[in-house]
Image (cartoon, rainbow, N blue to C red):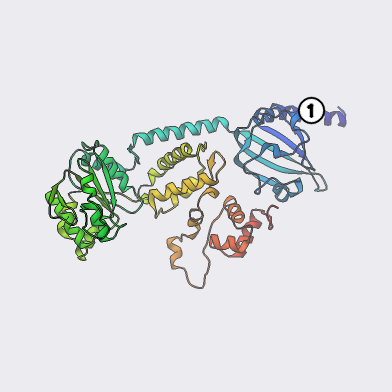
Amino acid sequence: MTKKTHEIWNFRFVNQIIDSMADGVFTMDAGGRISSWNPSMERISGYSAEEALGRTCEILQCSRCFGKKCPAGIKKCGIIELGFSEAKECFLKHKEGHNVSIIKNASVVRDENNDIIGVVETVTDMTELSKARRKIEEAALRLGEMHRLDNIIGKSHAMRNVFTAIKAAAASDVTVLVQGDSGTGKELVSGAIHYNSERAAGPLITVNCSALSESLLESELFGHVKGAYTGALHDRAGRFEEAEGGTVFLDEIGELSPYIQVKLLRVLQEREVERVGESKRRKINIRIIAATHRDLYTLVREGAFRDDLYYRLKVFPIQLPPLNQRRDDIPLLVGYFIQKHNKKTAKQIMGVSQATLRIFMDYNWPGNVRELENAIEHAFVVCNREQIEPYDLPVELRQARYRQLNKEETNRSVSRPYRRVKIDKEELLEILNESDWNKAEAARRIGISRTAVWKYMKKYRIPLQGPV
């Protein structure tokens, strides 16, 4: 066999291998134009070889190309600057308009003189795996339905105790005191108790005790008669009377003034009210659920809250755990909020990436479940893909992991101004993009020196100027 014949045979053999591969393979010439397109690329993208040849890879509209936008020429592409692109999961846009989940990899091809002669890219279809993941997520959502009471979701031991307490409270007519940090769902608990009780057909009246001054709150709760004060032009029933046969939810009960505390104590003891400006007592049939984020027992010891009122309220206490003490519930909550906002916005976001979930699981959540929902809602505003990535999240979540010091680092000497940080390439690229490739700003966000940022960029072969 002659050398030329051998080369022809090798060429045909390689082409046969590429054409028979399940993965999509295509090449681009030095000008960035597609020069080959195997049958699997036709299947994955919907574009035939005839349609793809001579065009740029922009037809794929890959969701995670190197840089923020597909450049006009191949020489401006990040792959050329780096020489390769790490395998990463992303989406391409099918010819028919729908997204296809893929893993994309690329590398530069050079000749014997080290000149670039083109790029070869491989595309692995992740559609079936994505379907399997969706089934798992849907199963998790169904699991969430099993571990929820009304709109309260959780499967953790702490939340199972809360569910048990809610059911017990709903089966009786006792006064309930719900305690927990802001954003833990105290109002949801009051609703769950009311709507699962025999009073469900009656009204549920909510009053925020911290939102009004003493005089306005008195009128709001107890009502007034005409002429009771300036502006009282007619008789008005208070919220206690309006809740007849139902439930009054008193939020932020710890903010009550001593005067209102005395009047509320009579309501709890006698189940009767007096409107402002009259001495007539009116009987009421209501249930009271109170809530606070403050430690009422401490307020009692400090003399800021009546002890007799405290014990009247605390007939049946329910303590809600903060989100950082029920991290097992975070995936369920994330799935629920995504489903909720999909309906609200008509988007079709399927879930969050592993990197995003890691941020959720590591974050301390000072705002609890309310903060988590706000983070998902923020992501819905900026995300236009099928899954939420870290850069879709509020900046405080993305930066939190870089601000937290390890226990060993809290005792470091003053002479060492920066801490040791381990950051991977993908995280560094995200922060550089957010900082417009300003190394000093990126260093400040991460908590390391600018020199360290340069060293990491050199280590990961990231160009100093970034994509144009």
Q: Residue at x 28, y 51 (%)?
A: 207
Number of residue marks: 1
In the rendered image of this protein, does residue 426 appear above or below residue 126?
below
Question: Residue 115: in sight, yes or no?
Answer: yes
Residue at label 1?
12
Q: Residue at x 35, y 40 (%)?
A: 151
**Disc 1 residue type (three-letter):** Arg
In the rendered image of this protein, does residue 34 appear above or below residue 265?
above
Query: Left or right of 313: which side holds 92?
Result: right
The spot of residue 338 in percent (x, y) is: 46, 40
The image quadrant where one finds the N terminus is top right
- Closer to the camera, 276 or 130? 276
The spot of residue 34 in percent (x, y) is: 76, 36
Q: Residue at x 19, y 44 (%)?
A: 286
Mark 1 residue crowding within 10 angstroms, few (<14) / some (14–19) / many (20+): few
Question: Residue 255: in sight, yes or no?
Answer: no
The spot of residue 9 in percent (x, y) is: 81, 28
In the rendered image of this protein, does residue 148 appear above or below residue 66?
above
The spot of residue 357 in percent (x, y) is: 47, 45
- Closer to the camera, 51 or 348? 348
- Closer to the camera, 374 or 439? 374
In the rendered image of this protein, does residue 399 appear above or below residue 44?
below
- Closer to the camera, 202 or 99? 202
**What is the secondary structure assignment of the residue under circle 1?**
helix
Which residue extends farthest bottom?
A: 415
Image-quadrant location for residue 8: top right
